[in-house]
Every structure is written in C-alpha cells, then in structure tokens.
C-alpha cells in the first residue's frame, strides 16, 4: 500500500524542526570547494554523521580535492533508489549584499535563508528527511537507498568520475533522483531527464611577431595589425545572425532528437516566453522566438555565448590606439553526441582552417551532455506521480535543461531524473547573494520523494 501524497505532505510538515536542525548543521559550514578546505571537511563530516545516524554504510572517496561521500542501505528490497546531491556551494560573493549571514540558517517569512538552502543543501536535507520519514511511517524502507554526495559539483568534480570508473558496481540502481524531486499541488512542474554539456574557452590574440609589442597610435591603423579586429573576425566565424553555429563539422555531430523529445517540446505548456521577457526586461527574445522554437532553443539545441570580451582602452578618457592584444571568454552548450573533447577538436580545426591560427585557444574543460530517454520507466513513473500531484496544473517533460552538471558520468549506469515546480524556483537567488528557499517547497520535496520511493518499490 502506497501512502498517498496528501498524507506524506502532512507528515513532512511535522518534520519541520528536524529538517531545520539538519539544514542548519549543513549551512553553517562554508563548504566552498577548492577555497575553504576546513569548511568543506567540516561539512563532509556533518553529512557523513547524518547518514550514519540513519543506518547507512558510509564511505568517502578522495584522491584529491573535496571528499565524495558514498552511502548505502541495503534493506533487501527488490529496487534501489539512488540520490545525487552536493554539499559544496558557490562562494558568497559580495558579503555586504547579504541581508543575513550566508553561513547561518535563518527562517524569515516561511523561507529558509543561507548559502545552499536552495542549491543543494536544502534538497539534500529534504532527501535525508524523506528517507527517515518513510522508515518511520512504514516500519521498513520500501527500497534500498544509495547516496552519492559530491563535494565538488560547483567547481567541476574530480573525485566523482574517478570513483565511478573504479566502482561501476556502486552505480547500479533503478533510478537516481538528481539534486531534487519536488511537486507542489496546483503549481506547474518540470520533469527533467538530462542536462546539456558545456565547454568553456578563452580565446587570446596578440603578441610578437604577429602583433605590435604594445598598443600603437591609431593613426597607424591599417598598417599596424589590430588584435581587436582579428578577434572579432574570428568570433564572427563561429556563429551567424540567425544563431546558426558555423563551426566546421559541429552540426554533423548532433544526434537528431527522437520522437519523444520532439513531442515533449511540442507539448510544453508554460508562460516561459512572457516570463523570460519580464525577467530580462526586453520586448523580444532572440529572433522573436516563442513556442516550439523557444523551447527547443532552451532544451534541445546547442548554443554558443561570448561571456566576456576584452581589448584596448575602456577608461573614461578617450585614447586613440590600435590594441596589441585581445581576449574573449566563450562557452559552448553542447548536446549529444558532442563531447567536451570533440568540441575542442572542432573549434581548433575550424579556426585553423579559417586562417585564424594566430588565435590561442585555452580550454577550461567542462561537462559532456547526458540524458535518460523520456520513455524510460523511471522517468515515466516520476512524470505520472508529478502529473497527479500538480493537477490541474501541468507537469512538463524536459529532455535536457539548458544548465550543465556531471550527469554524463551517471547516465551510462543509471536513469536520472530531476523535478521541481516553477513556483518554488522563483526568487531563490541560487548562486547569488541572499540565497533562500520556501519551507513549503522543501516539505513538498520530502513528501514527493517519499511518494517516488514507494512507487519505485512497486515498479515491475
Ligand atoms: Zn546544484
């Protein structure tokens, strides 16, 4: 017998105190990977302690950097549910912009405040509470449970891929909840089955013998080689005004979306277009995109961005110069079957072929894309459960988010799925100052996760 969502929701509400204690213990440690070693270690110990108290067999894997925490509870059930979370957080940024300390959990107007409350210490605490609640309610967990708690998600994991390649057996599970599983009555939700990849590059140009040793008087323009123009022409060869990516051979690597993906994009119902216009404060989105075009641009297609451009003089006074150097930061959001490695090869070959062998390409690495097919029984189970809970609002299926993360390490081993509701994602300031989360949404996460675990136990 599956305990219905309405009952789980009430039970989750009763756990408020326990939830706040757990979350408070996580938030107080400044666990910024590669920045605050002590904060990372203290938070890792806190997570291990909590898992240990819940009866998990806990271990850690750390070749270097922040420890990856692994935990397992085998209750002899038929099915195994895995969770992927991370206890590392983004740096706080400018501290004077915070209304309360990023490292102290505060409850104000039914929202919890502090770094990590929305990404991803809040959802981690919710999953732990959910497991504890289910065991108390049912007397026994309906599924075996595994936790993979990353300490390097925000910085680019090093331990995670190494652990997985050495321990593929640990990755066996019937489904993995990725960072969060939530659904709120009457609020449209998103059921996400994958993430685009992302590769970050710095393009640099300048220096002898191709360019002047220093900036030159602009009366000599047309004679002195300009690094600024060269960089602009190189960038211009990557994408046209219709948003088509022009990197040689790039589009050939893209696998056509399957029928399920296209149907999900066609069925997508939301105020996405008008919400984004409001958020940006613009009249029109790129190329007037709306409906299917907008949704597929966000959730299916590769994209290329200039994240920063630097050259010459930009001070308040005017200077007439030909810049001797220029640089740009570029990121490319990639989709299957492109990989970080392949994208870098293609970019290098393209610039060389176009005659831009004076452009130095520094690759900062990134994530490969990864997705679970929409038709997978685990995704269907979550979509069905989500549709029931949010009804009459809609549960949209999204083939891949436009954001990136280490999903591609998981998807060859275990189906992944992440779900949240639009309403709870508003105003959480994740990655920004004053990060917070509605308490109601964390309670909904506890309840929905418990529902998914029970349904998974019954899956054929
Ligand atoms: Zn996160």
Image (spheres, rainbow, N blue to C red):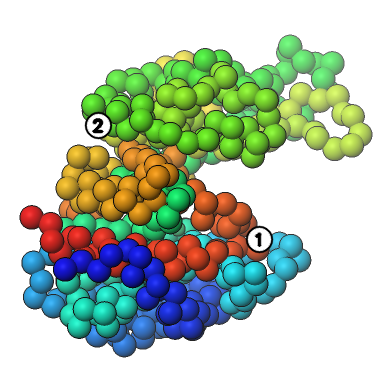
Q: CA distance from mark 2 to mark 1?
A: 38 Å
Picture residue at 85% right of the left edge, 37% below the top: 315
Quadrant of the snapshot with the N terminus: bottom left
Quadrant of the snapshot with the C terminus: bottom left
Front one among 332 and 218: 332
Rendered location of residue 273, percent (x, y): 55, 31
Rendered location of residue 138, percent (x, y): 21, 78
Q: Is residue 155 above or below residue 274?
A: below
Front one among 192 and 52: 192
Front one among 429 and 460: 460
Q: Is residue 72 above or below residue 353?
A: below
Rendered location of residue 40, percent (x, y): 47, 75
Q: Is residue 152 visible?
A: no
Disc 1 residue: CB within 8 Å of ligand 1: no
Q: Is residue 189 visible?
A: yes
Badge 2: residue crowd in 10 Å (few <14, some 14–19, many ≥20): some
Picture residue at 82% right of the left edge, 20% below the top: 218
- Residue 128 in the figure: left or right of residue 333: left
- Residue 27 in the figure: left or right of residue 141: right
- Residue 108 in the figure: left or right of residue 216: left
How many numbered dots are placed on residues in this image?
Answer: 2
Report the residue marked by disc 2: 260
Badge 1: residue crowd in 10 Å (few <14, some 14–19, many ≥20): many
Picture residue at 20% right of the left edge, 66% below the top: 2
Front one among 234 and 213: 234
Q: Quadrant of residue 61?
A: bottom left
Report the residue marked by disc 1: 433
Q: Which mark is residue 372?
A: none
Q: Tell which circle, 2 or 1, labels the residue nearer the N-terminal end.
A: 2
Pair 2/1: label in front: 2
């Amino acid at each position: 017998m599956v305990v219905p969502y309405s009952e789980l929701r009430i039970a989750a509400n009763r756990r408020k105190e326990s939830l706040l204690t757990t979350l408070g213990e996580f938030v107080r440690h400044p666990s910024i990977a590669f920045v605050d070693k002590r904060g990372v270690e203290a938070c890792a110990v806190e997570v291990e302690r909590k898992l240990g108290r819940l009866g998990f067999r806990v271990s850690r894997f750390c070749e270097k950097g922040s420890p990856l925490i692994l935990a397992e509870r085998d209750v002899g059930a038929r099915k195994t549910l895995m969770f992927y979370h991370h206890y590392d957080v983004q740096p706080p940024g400018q501290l004077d912009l915070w209304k309360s300390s990023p490292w102290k959990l505060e409850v104000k107007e039914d929202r919890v405040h502090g770094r990590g409350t929305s990404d991803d210490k809040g959802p981690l605490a919710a999953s732990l509470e959910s497991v504890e609640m289910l065991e108390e309610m049912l007397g026994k967990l309906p599924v075996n449970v595994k936790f993979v708690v990353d300490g390097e998600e925000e910085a680019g994991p090093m331990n995670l891929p190494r652990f997985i390649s050495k321990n593929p057996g640990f990755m066996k599970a019937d489904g993995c909840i990725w960072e969060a599983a939530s659904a709120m009555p009457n609020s449209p939700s998103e059921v996400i089955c994958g993430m685009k990849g992302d590769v970050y590059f710095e393009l640099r140009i300048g220096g002898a013998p191709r360019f002047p040793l220093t900036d030159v008087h602009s009366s000599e323009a047309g004679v002195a080689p300009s690094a600024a123009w060269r960089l602009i022409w190189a960038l211009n060869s990557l994408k046209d005004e219709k948003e088509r990516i022009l990197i040689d051979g790039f589009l050939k690597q893209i696998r056509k979306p399957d029928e399920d993906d296209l149907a999900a994009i066609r069925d997508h119902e939301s105020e996405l277009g008008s919400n984004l216009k409001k958020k940006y404060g613009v009249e029109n989105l790129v190329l007037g995109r709306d409906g299917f075009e907008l949704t597929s641009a966000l959730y299916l297609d590769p994209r290329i961005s200039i994240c920063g451009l630097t050259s010459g003089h930009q001070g308040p006074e005017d200077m007439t110069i030909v810049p001797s150097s220029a640089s740009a930061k570029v990121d490319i959001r990639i989709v299957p079957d492109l990989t970080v490695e392949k994208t870098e090869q293609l970019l290098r070959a393209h610039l060389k072929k176009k005659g831009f062998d004076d452009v130095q390409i520094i690759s900062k690495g990134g994530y490969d894309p990864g997705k679970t097919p929409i038709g997978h029984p685990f995704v269907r189970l979550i979509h069905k459960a989500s549709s029931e809970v949010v009804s009459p609002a809609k549960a949209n299926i999204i083939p891949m988010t436009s954001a990136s993360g280490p999903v591609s390490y998981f998807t060859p081993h275990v189906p992944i799925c992440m779900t949240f509701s639009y309403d709870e994602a508003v105003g959480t300031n994740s990655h920004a100052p004053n990060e917070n989360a509605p308490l109601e949404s964390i309670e909904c996460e506890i309840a929905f996760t418990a529902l998914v675990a029970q349904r998974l136990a019954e899956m054929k």
